[in-house]
Image (cartoon, rainbow, N blue to C red):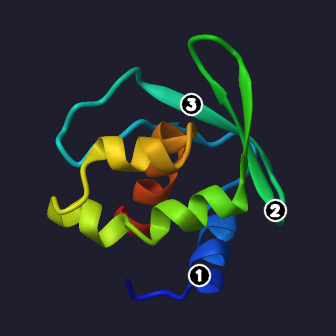
Amino acid sequence: MGLNREEFWYKILSCLKPGDRVKYWSVAGRVRGSYFIVKRVALEYITVEAESTRAEQTIPKRDFLAVYEKWEGYLKGHIKRYELRDITRFSSYIIGIIHKCLEED
């Protein structure tokens, strides 16, 4: 991990804006659905909306940080997808956002 926790969080905040469409992503190439939409970006959370259901989900900063701590292991195959799901029920959104903001640069 090249960024500390706060650097990571500010990278995420600066990468996203309301209205952004973010693609679901998986290291294994298995992608469920297509996109979700960023609704709000705040200092302590990000709110997204699933395109298919229009249901809003507010994801706390702590959940992003918990997944980020495992991110390198996930990319290298040492951490399985279900392990990230066990950390947070928002893992699908968080993985898509981290991939967009850190890996697509």
Q: Are marks 3 and 2 in contact (CB under 8 Å)?
A: no
Query: In the rendering, which numbered label is found on residue 5?
Result: 1
The residue located at (18%, 63%) in the rendering is 78
The residue located at (45%, 72%) in the rendering is 69
Q: CA distance from mark 3 to mark 1?
A: 24 Å
The residue located at (22%, 31%) in the rendering is 30
The type of residue carrying mark 1 is Arg
Q: Is label 3 or label 1 in front?
A: 1
Of 69 and 21, the residue lying toward us: 69
Where 27 sits versus 90, above or below?
below
Mark closest to the chain's N terminus, 3 or 2? 3
Mark closest to the chain's N terminus, 3 or 1? 1
Query: In the rendering, which numbered label is found on residue 44?
Result: 2
The type of residue carrying mark 2 is Glu
Give coordinates of residue 27: x percent, y percent: 23, 49
Q: Which residue is mark 3?
A: 36
Q: Are marks 1 and 2 in contact (CB under 8 Å)?
A: no
Give coordinates of residue 59: x percent, y percent: 70, 46
Q: Is residue 73 left or right of residue 25?
A: left
Where 54 sits versus 101, above or below?
above
